[in-house]
Image (spheres, rainbow, N blue to C red):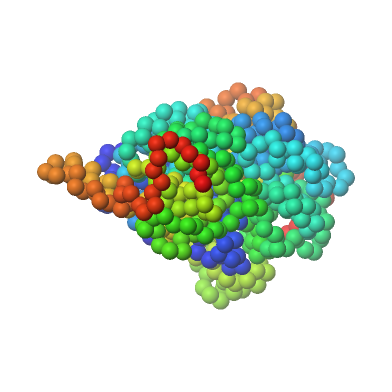
Amino acid sequence: MTKHPFPQVPGFSAEEVVSKIGFCEQLKGGVIMDVIDADQARIAEEAGACAVMALERVPADIRKFGGVARASDPEMIAAIQKAVSIPVMAKVRIGHFVEAQLLEAMEVDCIDESEVLTPADEQFHVDKRVFKTPFVCGCRDLGEALRRIHEGAAMIRTKGEAGTGNVVEAVRHMRALMSQIKELRAMDEKQLEKKASELRVPVELVQWVAEAQKLPVPNFSAGGVATPADAALMMQLGAEAVFVGSGIFKSGDPQKRAKAIVRAVTHFRDAKVLVEVSKGLGEPMVGINISELPEDQLLAKRGI
Amino acid sequence: MGDVRTEDGAPLVGVLALQGDFDDHEQALAAFGVRTRQVRTADGLRGLDGLVLPGGESTTMLKLLDVEGLWGPLGEALASGLPVFATCAGMILLAERVENPQQRSYGLLPITVVRNGYGRQFHSGTFALQLESNELPEGTTGTFIRAPRITAVGDCEVLARRDGDPVLVRKGPLLAACFHPELERGHAVVAMFVTAVRRAREAAGAIAAAVPAPRTAGAEAPGVAAPSKGVAQCASLRPAR
């Protein structure tokens, strides 16, 4: 008999499991698109996005403009909430719990505590348990994923390297996560205990993952997805849904590309559909070779 | 597909897998010993004993139904008499009328639904239900997630309410919930659908085998179409409360 997805999850109440994690379950098989205004939000919804991420600048522009990147203007978020019927998410700086309080007061559907913005706290992430709103957090490996879940994240996404249009880091992070989950399977009780202390999380959480062979929350992908094939790649590697940031609205034909990526995520194993949707999409966003980025511009190293 | 149903004797339910919590539905059904198939194309609709329209985003599903040329074939399957279980976004697809905003739907279930009628995610949660059917055990609750709200019901049974609003309705083989029974282990509403699938399959098997009186099979089946206590029956849409 298949294991049910919702036995108890260590650290979550039964109600939180269904309402917070359950919300994130609804986004599976979908595409969450970064949008900077109501017009883009409408285009995303029309293309079939299952949610939008409201922010003032897409990651590619955050890189370009530099300076401190903060949570978005509430007025702009409210305009997007008004424009669409799908869920609206927004980002807060790592550790900036007051920005999170603002977003909860605005009834944003999900909060992304994101390394794409400039971190506000170098020691602590937001205590996500005290919020009613579900949080999504980035990770590069199992340790980061479990620490964020222990803090109350109801959804995990790979960090990738946002705003580069280069999927290599998202692939690295997803592969690391999946293989580290597999490694747990062979471990005995003592080894799991050691692993838990190494990862700095309760042993119950590690045991849960070892047994279920998956994270207790949905596992999405983000950071560098620019084409339908990129999106399908992340799905085939184990992602359950995909975030696309700069990849859509920094491309030549956002509408067409958005629709293509939505379809690619649904049919991620059907190469014929992938061929069809990849035809004539126009210019993709210009990518950045991550090895050419100076160390201090790597976003994935924030909040570990 | 061939006669895939007889492989191990377990019924086979198709789960629309364009977007949403389709794998939660699959696992919820597997817990009752039902086999499932993810449906993404018209071919996937063949040889099924039941069909699930999962939760997710109804706008996303509508777009994908069109692109895949699945709108027509799925509509035929839904109207074919097959047991159907729809939750949240799935219920929106079945409704006669959809508001906030208005959008296209199959119109097979005589209800009016308002999308996100209970508010944004902040207002999501698990709520007590007032049961109007003896098929559900006392204390059955429902988890509502940005849930649609039924504001009018026509000729169909209301099996449960939340603060007076109908939240679980049935018309013949169509069972639809505003909430998400698939997210909870062994939920009674999933059990209700599984019962309907098994009975419909037995009835179909009886007909196929040309048993003299096939119609007796499942005629009094509680999971199929037996009227419940407190059934709301009326000819046309009326306010839900």
Pinpoint residue A160: horizontal percent, then vertical percent.
68, 47
Above or below: residue B44 compared with residue A294: above
Which residue lies at the image location 73% right of the left edge and 63% below the top edge? A127
Q: Nearer the viewer, residue B144 or A225?
A: B144
Please name whichever residue, A132 or A32, is drawn nearer the observer in this view of the structure: A132
> What residue do we see at 37% from left, 58% from top?
B134
Question: Is B174 in front, or is B197?
Answer: B174
Give the camera-side residue of A144 and A87: A87
Point out the image quarter for the C terminus of chain A: bottom right
- Where does the image place residue B66, in percent across and percent down from the top left? 49, 28
Which quadrant is the N terminus of chain A positioned in? bottom left
Q: Is residue A193 above or below residue A301?
A: below
Q: Position of residue A109 (x, y in %)?
A: 66, 48
Residue A164 appears in the figure: no
Query: Which quadrant holds residue B28?
Result: bottom left
Q: Residue furthest toward the right?
A: A67
Q: Residue at x 72, y 44 (%)?
A: A162
Farthest residue in the left direction? B212
